[in-house]
Image (cartoon, coloured by chain):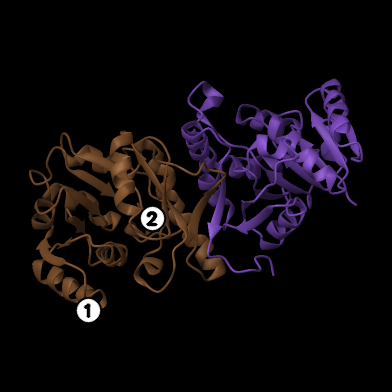
Chain colours: A brown, B purple
Amino acid sequence: MDPVAIIGASGALGFGLALRLARTGVPIAIGSRELARAEQTAERASAIVPEGAFSAHDNAGAARAADTVVLSVPFRNQSETLTNLKGVLRAGQLLIDATVPLAAAVSGKATRMLGVWQGSAAQQALEMAGEGVRVVSALHTVSADSLSELKRPLDQDVLVCGDSRADKRAAAALIERIDGLRCVDCGRLEMARTTEALTALLIAVNARYKTHAGVRLTDLPERLWD
Amino acid sequence: MDPVAIIGASGALGFGLALRLARTGVPIAIGSRELARAEQTAERASAIVPEGAFSAHDNAGAARAADTVVLSVPFRNQSETLTNLKGVLRAGQLLIDATVPLAAAVSGKATRMLGVWQGSAAQQALEMAGEGVRVVSALHTVSADSLSELKRPLDQDVLVCGDSRADKRAAAALIERIDGLRCVDCGRLEMARTTEALTALLIAVNARYKTHAGVRLTDLPERLWD
């Protein structure tokens, strides 16, 4: 099984994703800004999923270690992280961007979004990732808490955007290894401005109802990735 | 039973809503720009829902005839319609705005949104509706086709935004008369920029999957409007 790198795996979403994927047999390259932090995170993950294969790296090391890279960092750090990965990310690599430009990045409300010049964090990732990196946007609406609490069954959709159907299919095949997550093709990468914004909407809903809501699209056909 | 006015009831969404609400016993004041058009629409509606109570008006007449007004016009016409309703809409009236600023309004793609200066069509409605009109945003993600085909069971959420919980509750009580629609409080009116944008996202999903997708939020409590 090919490993998957998770950049920002010490954060809540990245960590939950690392746990859930590792349980399905995917070796996880844990990436953090500092190697020591990654090592702590890998230890923490191993304690929770003993059968999992976790390796610890700085972000560049993680990105080198896998053909599929999940970018799961706060928006405040997305640009810096991608700058640091320049020359590391390579053509053909699949980059799944889960960044959400919440206004919280600049001390605003988590129910509000920042305007990103390129249109969305995903489009910023595409611009910065370098020629040939296959950028797909996904995983914004899955709550970190729901992912991390392994006993909690998941039953929700992951909205996937990207300019290549094949790349989206590859991302979906990975994500759907996790029980209870169904991936839906939501169109081109530019649609990420809406899937990212859904996070802020869900934060508002969660505040009202004290829950960790997810999204489900209704009336879809049985097979979504033929 | 108090009547409900539907401004733009000759359009697909307004018409479907008129049918579905009329079936539950709500008298519908059908509003169109021209009275003759409203009369045709009322006739058409009566033929489909013979037990329904439909009256035909120009938009101003419809708005005068009811304490609850649904605004269901193309974004291209929203501003003009609200200008024409100045002095007609009155304090205390509930205005449920379902307008979606699709780029299609200016010959752009239906999967893209226009930027609205106030933030969203709903916020434009609030600004234009006049002092004391209670503006709630809802119904963007319910497809007109699904509403109009009365035989098709509905099973989806309506995302409701507004600055007053009481106003949202009132809108929800009305909308939930329709079997299979559940209203979810998605926060303040400013969140409408995301619920409106979901329409464009669903249009992209519908194009991909040849369906009429709706939205469902997961992991919510049983009671949403206590």
Residue count near mark 2 (Cα–Cα under 10 Å), binned few <14, some 14–19, many ≥20: some
Give the CA separation, mark 2 to mark 1.
Answer: 34 Å
Residue B68 place in picture, x, y as percent? 79, 47
Which mark, by number, is residue A47? Answer: 1
Q: Look at the picture and state if A138 lies above or below A19.
A: above
The quarter in which the C terminus of chain A is drawn is top left
Q: Chain of mark 2?
A: A
Quarter residue A18 falls in: bottom left
Chain under disc 1: A
The residue lying at 70 percent from left, 34 percent from top is B82
Residue indicated by mark 2: A103
Q: Position of residue A91 (x, y in %)?
A: 13, 37
Name the residue located 8 percent from the left edge and 57 percent from the top edge: A61
| Location of the N terminus of chain A (image quadrant) | bottom left
Q: Quadrant of residue A12?
A: bottom left
Name the residue nearer the viewer: A224 or B64: A224
Residue density around tag 1, few if under 14, some if 14–19, many if 20 or more, within 10 Å: few
